[in-house]
Amino acid sequence: SQTIHQWPATLVQPVGSPLSLECTVEGTSNPNLYWYRQAAGRGLQLLFYSVGIGQISSEVPQNLSASRPQDRQFILSSKKLLLSDSGFYLCAWSSGTAASGYTFGSGTRLTVV
Amino acid sequence: QKEVEQDPGPLSVPEGAIVSLNCTYSNSAFQYFMWYRQYSRKGPELLMYTYSSGNKEDGRFTAQVDKSSKYISLFIRDSQPSDSATYLCAMNSLRGGSQGNLIFGKGTKLSVKP
Protein backbone atom coordinates (compact mmCIF):
# COMPACT_ATOMS: atom_id res chain seq x y z
CA SER A 1 0.00 0.00 0.00
CA GLN A 2 1.02 3.58 -0.54
CA THR A 3 2.21 5.71 2.35
CA ILE A 4 3.38 9.28 2.62
CA HIS A 5 5.84 10.49 5.23
CA GLN A 6 6.35 14.08 6.23
CA TRP A 7 8.69 15.45 8.85
CA PRO A 8 9.22 17.06 11.22
CA ALA A 9 5.79 17.31 12.83
CA THR A 10 6.59 20.55 14.64
CA LEU A 11 9.26 23.16 14.02
CA VAL A 12 10.10 26.47 15.67
CA GLN A 13 12.57 28.58 13.72
CA PRO A 14 13.91 32.12 14.15
CA VAL A 15 13.31 34.78 11.53
CA GLY A 16 16.02 34.72 8.89
CA SER A 17 16.93 31.07 9.41
CA PRO A 18 16.76 28.49 6.58
CA LEU A 19 14.07 25.87 6.21
CA SER A 20 13.96 22.37 4.81
CA LEU A 21 10.86 20.18 5.01
CA GLU A 22 10.94 16.74 3.47
CA CYS A 23 8.22 14.51 2.12
CA THR A 24 8.58 10.98 0.78
CA VAL A 25 6.09 8.59 -0.76
CA GLU A 26 6.30 4.81 -0.70
CA GLY A 27 4.49 2.15 -2.67
CA THR A 28 3.95 4.05 -5.90
CA SER A 29 6.00 5.40 -8.78
CA ASN A 30 5.87 8.69 -10.68
CA PRO A 31 3.36 10.32 -8.34
CA ASN A 32 2.22 13.93 -8.63
CA LEU A 33 3.45 15.72 -5.52
CA TYR A 34 2.10 18.84 -3.85
CA TRP A 35 3.01 21.28 -1.10
CA TYR A 36 0.20 23.16 0.61
CA ARG A 37 0.11 25.71 3.40
CA GLN A 38 -2.92 25.98 5.63
CA ALA A 39 -3.51 29.08 7.71
CA ALA A 40 -6.44 29.54 10.06
CA GLY A 41 -9.48 30.81 8.21
CA ARG A 42 -7.73 30.76 4.86
CA GLY A 43 -8.05 27.17 3.75
CA LEU A 44 -5.49 25.20 1.78
CA GLN A 45 -3.13 27.25 -0.32
CA LEU A 46 -1.31 25.34 -3.07
CA LEU A 47 2.35 26.37 -3.04
CA PHE A 48 4.05 23.98 -5.46
CA TYR A 49 3.28 20.89 -7.44
CA SER A 50 5.45 18.49 -9.40
CA VAL A 51 4.61 15.92 -12.08
CA GLY A 52 8.12 14.47 -12.29
CA ILE A 53 11.74 14.67 -11.18
CA GLY A 54 13.05 18.20 -11.51
CA GLN A 55 9.66 19.53 -12.67
CA ILE A 56 8.29 22.14 -10.28
CA SER A 57 5.36 24.48 -10.81
CA SER A 58 4.91 27.40 -8.47
CA GLU A 59 1.43 28.65 -7.75
CA VAL A 60 2.26 31.54 -5.47
CA PRO A 61 5.34 33.83 -5.66
CA GLN A 62 6.91 33.91 -2.22
CA ASN A 63 9.87 33.27 -0.02
CA LEU A 64 9.77 29.50 -0.55
CA SER A 65 11.10 27.06 -3.14
CA ALA A 66 10.61 23.38 -3.84
CA SER A 67 12.71 20.63 -5.33
CA ARG A 68 12.16 17.05 -6.40
CA PRO A 69 15.54 15.35 -6.47
CA GLN A 70 14.08 11.83 -6.64
CA ASP A 71 10.85 10.37 -7.97
CA ARG A 72 9.23 10.01 -4.55
CA GLN A 73 10.91 12.84 -2.66
CA PHE A 74 9.66 16.41 -2.45
CA ILE A 75 11.44 19.12 -0.48
CA LEU A 76 10.21 22.54 0.58
CA SER A 77 12.91 25.09 1.34
CA SER A 78 13.57 28.66 2.28
CA LYS A 79 16.84 30.53 2.54
CA LYS A 80 15.52 33.07 5.05
CA LEU A 81 12.27 32.58 6.90
CA LEU A 82 9.82 35.41 7.50
CA LEU A 83 7.25 35.67 10.28
CA SER A 84 4.56 35.30 7.62
CA ASP A 85 5.90 31.85 6.73
CA SER A 86 4.37 30.43 9.90
CA GLY A 87 1.62 27.92 9.23
CA PHE A 88 0.70 24.29 8.80
CA TYR A 89 2.48 22.74 5.81
CA LEU A 90 1.06 19.70 4.12
CA CYS A 91 2.55 17.42 1.50
CA ALA A 92 0.25 15.34 -0.72
CA TRP A 93 0.50 12.91 -3.58
CA SER A 94 -1.82 11.71 -6.32
CA SER A 95 -1.60 9.29 -9.22
CA GLY A 96 -2.23 12.18 -11.60
CA THR A 97 -5.65 11.15 -12.84
CA ALA A 98 -8.59 13.47 -12.27
CA ALA A 99 -10.49 10.82 -10.30
CA SER A 100 -7.70 9.83 -7.94
CA GLY A 101 -7.91 12.48 -5.26
CA TYR A 102 -4.99 13.39 -3.05
CA THR A 103 -3.44 11.61 -0.08
CA PHE A 104 -2.01 13.99 2.48
CA GLY A 105 0.82 13.63 4.92
CA SER A 106 0.40 14.38 8.60
CA GLY A 107 1.69 17.94 8.25
CA THR A 108 4.38 20.15 9.77
CA ARG A 109 3.43 23.00 12.06
CA LEU A 110 5.99 25.74 11.51
CA THR A 111 6.27 28.67 13.87
CA VAL A 112 8.67 31.43 12.92
CA VAL A 113 9.68 33.53 15.92
CA GLN B 1 -16.30 35.00 -7.68
CA LYS B 2 -14.17 32.27 -6.15
CA GLU B 3 -14.20 28.88 -7.86
CA VAL B 4 -15.37 27.06 -4.73
CA GLU B 5 -17.30 28.62 -1.86
CA GLN B 6 -17.78 26.92 1.49
CA ASP B 7 -19.23 28.35 4.68
CA PRO B 8 -16.43 28.15 7.28
CA GLY B 9 -18.83 27.79 10.21
CA PRO B 10 -18.20 26.93 12.97
CA LEU B 11 -21.17 24.60 13.10
CA SER B 12 -22.19 23.15 16.46
CA VAL B 13 -24.81 20.40 16.74
CA PRO B 14 -25.98 17.98 19.45
CA GLU B 15 -25.09 14.33 19.22
CA GLY B 16 -27.51 12.42 17.01
CA ALA B 17 -28.38 15.41 14.81
CA ILE B 18 -28.35 15.33 11.02
CA VAL B 19 -25.60 17.55 9.68
CA SER B 20 -25.65 19.22 6.27
CA LEU B 21 -22.43 20.64 4.83
CA ASN B 22 -22.44 22.45 1.52
CA CYS B 23 -20.28 23.93 -1.21
CA THR B 24 -21.07 25.91 -4.31
CA TYR B 25 -18.82 26.25 -7.33
CA SER B 26 -18.63 28.28 -10.51
CA ASN B 27 -16.65 26.10 -12.96
CA SER B 28 -19.04 23.96 -15.01
CA ALA B 29 -16.09 21.77 -16.10
CA PHE B 30 -15.79 20.19 -12.66
CA GLN B 31 -16.63 16.49 -12.84
CA TYR B 32 -15.11 14.92 -9.73
CA PHE B 33 -16.30 15.93 -6.29
CA MET B 34 -14.76 14.92 -3.00
CA TRP B 35 -15.14 15.50 0.70
CA TYR B 36 -12.17 15.45 3.03
CA ARG B 37 -12.24 15.26 6.80
CA GLN B 38 -9.48 16.92 8.79
CA TYR B 39 -9.01 16.41 12.50
CA SER B 40 -7.16 19.06 14.46
CA ARG B 41 -3.42 19.13 13.73
CA LYS B 42 -3.72 16.30 11.19
CA GLY B 43 -3.68 16.11 7.41
CA PRO B 44 -7.00 15.88 5.51
CA GLU B 45 -8.23 12.39 4.66
CA LEU B 46 -10.53 11.48 1.78
CA LEU B 47 -14.01 10.73 3.08
CA MET B 48 -16.30 10.56 0.06
CA TYR B 49 -15.86 10.74 -3.70
CA THR B 50 -18.53 11.29 -6.36
CA TYR B 51 -18.34 11.52 -10.10
CA SER B 52 -20.74 13.91 -11.87
CA SER B 53 -24.27 14.27 -10.50
CA GLY B 54 -26.14 12.05 -8.09
CA ASN B 55 -25.93 10.63 -4.60
CA LYS B 56 -23.48 8.32 -2.93
CA GLU B 57 -23.97 6.73 0.46
CA ASP B 58 -21.39 5.24 2.80
CA GLY B 59 -22.69 4.31 6.23
CA ARG B 60 -23.85 7.48 7.98
CA PHE B 61 -22.47 9.70 5.22
CA THR B 62 -24.22 10.74 2.00
CA ALA B 63 -22.62 12.89 -0.68
CA GLN B 64 -24.89 14.68 -3.11
CA VAL B 65 -24.00 16.54 -6.30
CA ASP B 66 -26.34 18.83 -8.24
CA LYS B 67 -24.41 19.96 -11.30
CA SER B 68 -27.32 22.01 -12.65
CA SER B 69 -27.16 24.19 -9.54
CA LYS B 70 -23.38 23.83 -9.09
CA TYR B 71 -24.01 22.70 -5.53
CA ILE B 72 -22.67 19.78 -3.53
CA SER B 73 -23.62 18.52 -0.09
CA LEU B 74 -22.42 16.12 2.55
CA PHE B 75 -24.99 14.76 5.00
CA ILE B 76 -24.03 13.08 8.25
CA ARG B 77 -26.77 11.09 9.97
CA ASP B 78 -26.76 10.29 13.68
CA SER B 79 -23.76 12.56 14.19
CA GLN B 80 -21.21 11.51 16.82
CA PRO B 81 -18.65 13.50 18.84
CA SER B 82 -15.99 11.67 16.81
CA ASP B 83 -17.33 13.45 13.71
CA SER B 84 -16.04 16.74 15.14
CA ALA B 85 -13.55 17.93 12.54
CA THR B 86 -13.15 20.33 9.65
CA TYR B 87 -14.76 19.14 6.42
CA LEU B 88 -13.35 20.34 3.11
CA CYS B 89 -14.99 19.95 -0.25
CA ALA B 90 -12.76 19.50 -3.29
CA MET B 91 -13.36 19.19 -7.00
CA ASN B 92 -11.56 19.03 -10.33
CA SER B 93 -12.04 18.51 -14.01
CA LEU B 94 -10.66 16.21 -16.67
CA ARG B 95 -8.35 18.92 -17.95
CA GLY B 96 -4.63 18.38 -17.76
CA GLY B 97 -1.87 20.42 -16.21
CA SER B 98 -2.67 22.86 -13.44
CA GLN B 99 -6.30 22.95 -14.51
CA GLY B 100 -6.59 19.33 -13.39
CA ASN B 101 -5.47 20.15 -9.85
CA LEU B 102 -7.98 19.74 -7.06
CA ILE B 103 -9.67 22.96 -5.98
CA PHE B 104 -10.52 22.99 -2.27
CA GLY B 105 -13.11 24.87 -0.30
CA LYS B 106 -11.91 26.62 2.85
CA GLY B 107 -13.52 23.98 5.07
CA THR B 108 -16.37 23.96 7.58
CA LYS B 109 -15.50 23.33 11.21
CA LEU B 110 -18.02 20.97 12.82
CA SER B 111 -18.43 20.33 16.51
CA VAL B 112 -20.77 17.57 17.74
CA LYS B 113 -21.64 17.98 21.42
CA PRO B 114 -22.37 14.91 23.57
Image (cartoon, helix red, strand yellow):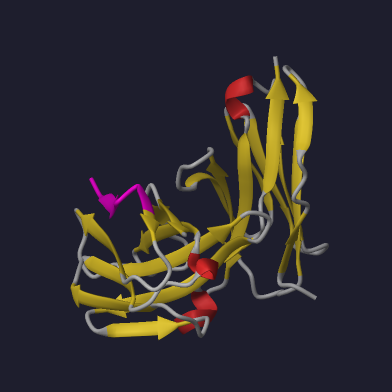
Q: Position of residue B14 (x, y in %)?
A: 77, 20
Residue A68 sits above or below residue A35 on the image: below
In the figure, is residue A63 to the left or right of A43? Answer: left
- Residue B80, horizontal then vertical, whole percent: 64, 20
Furthest residue to the right? Answer: B69
Who is closer to the viewer here, B17 or A41? A41
Q: Which contiguous range is marked in magenta? A: A1-11
What residue is rendered at 62% in x and 51% in y?
A: B88
Residue at image x 76%, y 49%? Answer: B22
Name the quadrant containing residue B27: bottom right
Give the quarter of the figure containing the N terminus of chain A.
top left
Report if residue A49 is visible in the image.
Answer: yes
Q: Is residue B81 above or below residue A7?
A: above
Magenta span includes B59: no
The magenta stretch spans residue A3: yes
Q: Residue at x 66, y 59 (%)?
A: B105
Q: Main secondary structure of the magenta part?
A: strand
Which residue, as the protein is rendered here, is positioned at the far top?
A: B114
* B62 displayed left or right of A71: right
Nearer to me, A90 or A21? A21
Residue B46, position as x, y percentages in the image: 49, 46
Q: Is residue B102 visible?
A: no
